[in-house]
Amino acid sequence: MSANDILSMLIEGTGDTLLMVLISTAFGYVIGLPVGIALTVSDTNGIAPNRALYKVLDGVVNVTRSVPFLILLILIQPLTKLIVGKSYGTVATIVPLTLAAAPLVARMVESSLKEVDEGVIEAALSMGAGKGTVIAKVLVPEARISLLIGVTISLGTILGYSAMAGVIGGGGLGDIAIRYGYYRYETKIMIITVVVLVLLMQVLQWIGNLLSKKLDRRRA
């Protein structure tokens, strides 16, 4: 392959990888954020304790997080095909990535919300704030920096998962690394792909750190 062909392929692969990571993480938050909030408020020390609900949600999150991503990827291929019409490629990989992101996000959100000072929550409740108001006006705003750090960690984790999806033709940089670096013994392409993945991870981390610092200054 010529240098131009490799560059073109890597640019397309990087775009596909970012597409997969950003969309699946966003969908993961659509599912995981309310679950994380529900886990927080229904826990023993939450503002609306509900042991049965907590046990069910906690069990579901633990089970889904325990399934290795490669196994999940293969296990839900019929579901993926049902949703997007095929079980391989960039768009198809978003489905298992979302299912992998959701329980991770739920646990991150729960951890972040539980860091909020109980005194602040009690003060809001004593002033007559409803539970919904406490969640929207106290819990989430007070935990925003921790939540943002959680987003950064989630993006990094899902980026790693997206590379694994290349094993079954998941698209993106992982697919390039597998097809050319592994099956065709193109070591140069493999190394370049790994470097690009590392750079993407660093950029995402840098953006997350920058935003968290800005939010921290606003709170101060």
Image: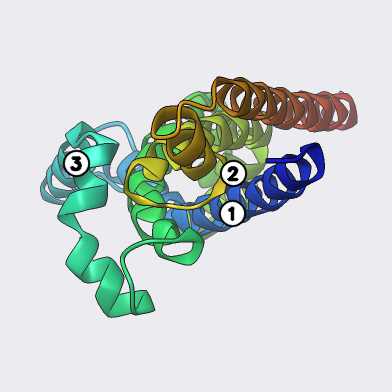
Q: Residue at x 13, y 48 (%)?
A: 56
Residue under numbered circle 1: 136
Residue 101 appears in view: yes
**In this image, 219 relative to 95: left or right?**
right
- Ranked by sequence position, the earlier of labels 2 and 3 is 3
Tell me the quarter of the picture where residue 192 sits.
top right
Label 3 element class: helix
Contact flag, marks 1 and 2 (Cβ < 8 Å): yes
Q: Is residue 212 above or below residue 9?
A: above
Between 138 and 55, the residue placed more toward the observer is 55
Residue 38 appears in view: no
Label 1 element class: helix
Crowding at label 2, few (<14), some or many (≥20) Cα neighbours within 10 Å? Answer: some
Which circle, 2 or 3, is nearer the viewer? 3
Label 2 element class: helix
Residue under numbered circle 3: 71
Between 32 and 83, the residue placed more toward the observer is 83
Coordinates of residue 186 in the picture (x, y in percent)? 54, 27
Mark on residue 185? none
Residue under numbered circle 2: 140
Residue type (three-letter) at the residue carrying disc 3: Ile
